Image (tube, grey):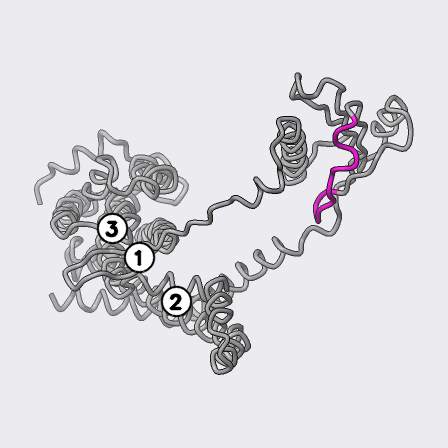
């Protein structure tokens, strides 16, 4: 046991003391927050030029009804339609919208241009065409479009979760966001730290250092110490990322909301309660903060650590076995697909199915099977998972780790001292039955 602890200590301290570890640990949260802030800013202010559309309306219904937006600018055609089409063939920015006389029967228009129109502009043009034609048809039917437009029930769903302690606020949006983030983090971490284990094994094998180490410790002890040591590095890094991200987001929120909070307090003091409540309820930052508060973040983070560690131990054992069976990293490709396929499948299913159907049978089984549960269960968790399902999933995850480690150790003890021979699946199967 002491030898395993020494290997864990060596693997952990060697990596934690590296400048690259410290740099990535402190820079990643700031870079991620800065990236999302830049994306949000560019999404709002990035459109520096509106799409110019020349309208040729044979029906006479639309020309004066179009409204310019930030993305699309409408104008009546200044030349004949034939000439406009010729000009559009040479003009990179010109778009010609032709509306036929019998538009109400055809329900079809034509948009001519030299290049393809953007989806946002196309959506705006389509929406305005439908709105104008709808208003015209309502008018023909004797229905006042303005009166109809004012009849728009605005119903908001205030979700309440029933617990043993009573009712508490619930937010499906926050659960979706946390599940989305957890799937990405688990998927990335299992690949990143599992690959580190594999590279470490390959480096020690190719440099022949492992021959010296094996003289003092058993192959299983070396593999276990390496896996646990690098796993602790991952937990340390994730914990620091979460602490730093929370601190940065909290500080930024206080700065950004300082003026808003003070104005709301002033309005409350002055007796403008309704206005203050309305402003607070529509403020995006406050909405996000209140949504996050509906989640039990401590519970989710604890489960995240359990599933990260369990998933990491399973996959890193397999990565270590692969690393011991080859002489260089290029030879690992033939063994990587069967290992990574369950992860990739669950990752894709997380966004296409599990997030939208967290209580389905497929979501349940994916969150129970050890090779898929680290991602699937973390996606389901924010939506609420019965205790028995969580307990069963964790028990099977531990069982999966024990079985996987046993299989990996059989391959590792033979492969780590095997040089100059390309291993095949048939060869790996033989190694499982070699006696010590």
State which mark lies toward you, 2 or 3. Answer: 2
Residue 255 in picture, x, y percent from top left: 52, 76
Left or right: residue 162 versus residue 332 is left
Outermost residue, front direction? 142
Q: Which of marks 2 and 1 is nearer the N terminus?
A: 1
- Residue 310: x percent and y percent? 21, 53
For mark 1, does the 10 Å Cα neighbourhood hold few (<14), some (14 to 19), or many (20 or more) residues?
many
Distance, label 1 to label 3, CA atoms, is 29 Å
Tell whether position 138 is magenta: no
Q: Residue at x 80, y 23 (%)?
A: 58
Q: Mark 3 points at which residue?
A: 311
Residue 64 shows up from this direction: yes
Mark 3 element type:
helix
Disc 1 secondary structure class: loop
Viewer-nearest of discs 1 and 3: 1
- In which quadrant of the rendered image does the C terminus lie? top left
Residue 202 image offset from top left, x and y in percent: 33, 50
Q: Is the magenta stretch mostly helix, strand or loop?
A: loop
Write the residue at 49% across / 65% down: 278
Q: Can residue 191 be seen by looking at this rendering?
A: no
Lower sequence index among marks 2 and 3: 2
User: How far apart are the alpha carbons under marks 2 and 1?
Assistant: 26 Å
**Disc 2 vs disc 3: Cβ atoms closer than 8 Å?**
no
Q: What stretch is highlighted in magenta?
A: 60-72
- Read off the residue under disc 2: 241
- As drawn, the label of residue 170 is 1
- Report the side of 72 relative to 168 (left or right): right
Q: Nearer the viewer, residue 422 or 239?
A: 239
Above or below, 150 against 214 in this view is above
């Amino acid at each position: 046991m002491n030898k395993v602890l020494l290997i864990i200590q060596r693997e952990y301290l060697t990596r934690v003391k590296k400048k690259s570890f410290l740099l990535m640990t402190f820079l990643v949260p700031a870079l991620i927050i800065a990236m999302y802030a830049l994306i949000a800013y560019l999404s709002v202010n990035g459109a520096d030029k509106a799409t110019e559309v020349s309208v040729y309306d044979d029906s006479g219904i639309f020309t004066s009804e179009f409204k310019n937006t930030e993305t699309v600018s409408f104008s009546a055609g200044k030349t004949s339609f034939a000439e406009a089409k010729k000009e559009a063939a040479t003009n990179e920015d010109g778009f010609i919208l032709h509306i036929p006389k019998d538009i109400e029967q055809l329900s079809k228009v034509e948009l001519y241009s030299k290049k393809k129109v953007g989806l946002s502009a196309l959506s705006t043009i389509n929406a305005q065409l439908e709105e104008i034609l709808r208003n015209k048809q309502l008018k023909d039917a004797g229905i006042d479009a303005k009166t109809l437009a004012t009849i728009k029930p605005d119903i908001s769903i205030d979700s309440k979760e029933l617990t043993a302690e009573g009712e508490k606020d619930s937010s499906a949006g926050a659960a979706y966001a946390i599940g989305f983030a957890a799937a990405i983090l688990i998927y990335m971490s299992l690949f990143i730290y599992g690959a580190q284990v594999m590279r470490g094994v390959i480096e020690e094998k190719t440099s022949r250092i492992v021959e010296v180490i094996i003289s003092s410790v058993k192959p299983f002890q070396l593999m276990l110490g390496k896996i646990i040591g690098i796993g602790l590095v991952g937990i340390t890094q994730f914990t620091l990322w979460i602490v730093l991200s929370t601190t940065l987001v909290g500080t930024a929120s206080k700065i950004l909301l300082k003026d808003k909070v003070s104005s709301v307090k002033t309005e409350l003091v002055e007796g403008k309660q309704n206005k203050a409540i309305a402003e607070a309820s529509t403020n995006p930052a406050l909405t996000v903060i209140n949504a996050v508060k509906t989640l039990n973040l401590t519970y989710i983070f604890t489960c995240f650590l359990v599933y990260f560690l369990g998933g990491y131990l399973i996959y890193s054992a397999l990565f270590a076995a692969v690393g011991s069976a080859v002489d260089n990293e290029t030879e690992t490709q033939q063994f990587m697909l069967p290992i990574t396929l369950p992860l990739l499948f669950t990752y894709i299913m997380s966004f296409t199915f599990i997030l939208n159907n967290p209580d389905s049978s497929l979501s349940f089984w994916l969150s129970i099977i050890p090779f898929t549960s680290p991602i699937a269960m973390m996606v389901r968790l924010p939506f609420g998972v019965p205790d028995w399902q969580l307990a069963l999933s964790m028990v099977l995850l531990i069982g999966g780790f024990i079985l996987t480690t046993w299989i990996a150790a059989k391959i590792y003890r033979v492969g780590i001292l095997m040089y100059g021979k390309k291993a095949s699946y048939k060869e790996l199967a033989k190694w499982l039955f070699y006696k010590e």
